[in-house]
Amino acid sequence: MRAGELRRAFSSFWAERGHEVRASASLIPHEPSLLFTVAGMVPFMPYFLGEEVPPSRRMTTIQKCVRAGGKHNDLDDIGRTNRHFTFFEMMGNFSFGDYFKAEAVPWAWEFVTEVLGLEPEKLWITVHVSDDEAAEIWRDSVGIPAERIQRLDKDNWWAAGDIGPCGPCSEIFYDLGPEHGGDGGPALGGEDRFIEVWNLVFMQFANDGTGELTPLDAPGIDTGAGLERILAVLQGVPSAWDIDLFAPLLAEAERICGKSYGADSETDVSMRIFADHARATAMLISDGVFPSNEDRGYVLRRIIRRAVRHAWVLGVEEVVMPRLTDIVVDVMGDHYTDLRTNREFISDVVGREEERFRTTLAAGQRILDEAIAKLEGGADGPVLDGSVAFLLHDTHGFPVEVTEEILAERGISLDGAGFAAEMEAQRQRARAGRAGGPTFADERYREILAQFGPTEFIRDASAVSEARVLAAFEIDSAAIEPALLADADEAHGYAYVEVYLDRTPFYAESGGQIGDVGTINGSAGSVEVLDCTYALADLHRHIGRVRGGGVEVGSLVEAQIDDVRRAAIRRNHTGTHILHWALREVLGQHVKQAGSLVAPDRLRFDFSHYDAVTPEQLREIERLANAEIIANGRCRHYETSMDDAQSIGAIAFFGDKYGDVVRVLEAGEHSVELCGGTHVAALGDIGHLRIVSESSIGSNMRRIEAMSGLATVERLADVEDLLGGLAELVNAPADELAGAVRRRLDETKELRRQVRDLQRALASGRATELAEAATDGVVIADLGDLERDALRDLAVSVRDHDGIRAVVLASAPSGGGVALVAAVDPAGTLSAADLLRDAARTVGGGFGAKGDPPLVMAGGRDPEGIGAALDQVRAAALGA
Ligand code: SER
């Protein structure tokens, strides 16, 4: 019986017994807790749980299944056993609260023995340890000898996932004969001898995910019969790989490997992997799964990559997966017709994924070769550091199995514990950083890196370079730092993009040095680059504004940085190193850099120090730095190993990432630091370094801001302009400015004193005048712009005149606002506070006097209110 015949026989057997025949559901399940459809029952989970009403209580399917990743994961066994596949077809009959064990068991037996014609004496039965009922049915209704019914525990319990319907099961095994393994039935005998052909699950419980089991209202039947395994038994072959469905695939695998199947056991494993993984790949892509770095896409990617890796290890250089998936379409397309519709799409997707991965493999191989070349033999032979394997795996997508295979060939072992520790640390980081998985953006960046590898940074070449556009995404202006956008941008409605190039002269912001700006020019238009940052380590993201038609992905462009700006950045960056050295010389070697900013117009340097830096120290630091700069020592910027860098005493620079290979800057005679930034060729290029501020930024943390190059020249010119302007104002030569200003300050002081005396003399004359003009012993007057203190003094001297009961004066002092004062004869009947209360409110103010003092002052905001306020006082004092 061939595959097609078996499918037809199965479906009609169950149709005759009242089952609705359904086509296979997708490999992508609706059930969110599952990655793939792992069994025939998956699409029916809601029916078993009673959450939905089934259209029919008896159904039958031949369901596409994938078991790779998650609870049901056979990926690592593929090729090494006779019965595991990532993709397989599961035939099933289902009862949703309809028939149960008493019907399902005899029907299964009937199909297996009568329709398929399997010899009853070669069949064994297993039931769950708890399931007496099933055991009795097999023995009494079907007539199986008791010694061929075995009881198992975990092996006879079935669940799709950690949540959902589950129950005890009963399985039928076929005995291939003693030449395939030991006696003892499925419970005790050989795995390759007793082949499971049928699994009857008695769905009885719902698992809520914690292990708590609730009995189902309507228990049902879920049967799973693996099509490939049954075919193997029917076709009389010892291994399911030998059935008709695999033959054309293995034949193609033989052509790919240039060897016959069966000639060499390791190559056979690879050939089976080609056959199996091609089936899973074609089926998954046809159902809409794409290779990616997330959940099911990631599993698909692993499946494809595993197959490609086998081809690569076998030395097969051409792309093989599309050839294989094409055969899957030929073999399976009659039953799964979508495959035919999607034929080209499938080979396109898998072909591109394979090409991409082959580039990764080639790049990884190079990195590994370099690392191997540096290895030295230990006591047990050379050992490769786990961090190298991790870097290959993590950054370059180079599988650790491949690393191990290559190492094994050369008699090198891998520090597996080191690798595992890095992986664990990575998992921790991912867990800490994850809120709903990697973001879409991360995903795209990883894709670019996986596909094209790291961006090549053109460090020393001229500022222009030819590059290819690898990718470009339009982005929202909201994603761009506002400071980068000109005011005009909003009105113009520019489009903004991120551009990825294979090589670039643009420095991506790191180690304190800000990103370059410039242009990317293509034939269609250009991108004005506003900033360059790392999207991922080693992936330069050019952020810019689209001009004209922008740039086209795949096209060649000219990438050009603003080199005047870059030169200024270089001066400030090397200047930062010299400043750091001078700080340590003057303040002590405890000084450590805690952060920095290197921009074209300035540099900022944060460092640890327990005290304020005195002006003398600052001056000394600046003098030392400039002496070093003027000495014009050479700057050497080179790559070396971390060990070498440490041995020459290089200081690690804050905020940079370091691998095994590091970049060292030796600037002049004294400064040696690790640094990935860009630097001048000789210290004299820095020009003059000028500290412009020093301040505290927290406990034991200081910040220095400085500038160099033309910026200091401009600053000096500005300062001179300022001094010249001031000298002109005080009408003195610039070098006598200080004396001239001091003289003027003394003069001002003297003038102030004279004014005060004059005011007092004036006031006492005024007091007599006011007292003489009193009405019924009360003086009320507006004193114009008299100052507050003078107003108070005046009020007191008026009151001290004979016969004065109360004085209320107001003024609008030149500094703004209103001053009010009331002074009364303490022996009299009038209250100063009462006199002012309403008046103060009228000028928009109030006063805070407590009790009833004879002198009260009040303030206000509103000079226009003075007249009305004094009227109120008059009414209160004189009743007029
Ligand atoms: N769900 C069970 C299995 O997958 C029976 O269909 O084996």
Image: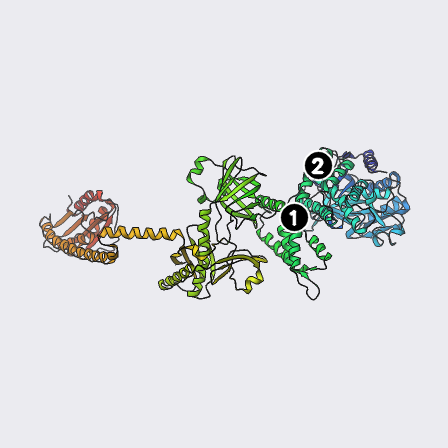
Residues tagged 2 and 1 counted as in contact (Cβ below 8 A): no
Q: Is residue 720 left or right of residue 425?
A: left
Task: Residue under label 1, please give it.
Answer: 360
Q: Locate residue 177, reporting x and y percent.
A: 89, 49
- Disc 1 Cβ-to-ligand 1 distance below 8 Å: no
For marks 2 and 1, the one nearer the N-term is: 2
Pick whichever, 329 or 54, lies toward us: 329
Query: As shown in the figure, which amino acid type bears the numbered disc 1?
Result: Thr
Splitting the image into 4 quarters, where does residue 56 fall?
A: top right
Q: Give the colour scheme shown.
A: rainbow
- Disc 2, SS: loop
Q: Is residue 356 visible?
A: yes
Is 437 on the left or on the right of 789, as rendered? right
Q: Does 385 appear above or below 20?
A: below
Between 121 and 80, the one lying in front of the other is: 80
Q: Position of residue 756 (x, y in %)?
A: 16, 55
Distance, label 2 to label 1, CA atoms, is 50 Å
How crowded is the residue under tag 2: few (<14 C-alpha within 10 Å), some, or many (20+)? few
Residue position for label 2: 53
Give the structural element (helix, strand or loop) at label 1.
helix
Quarter of the image with the C terminus in it: top left
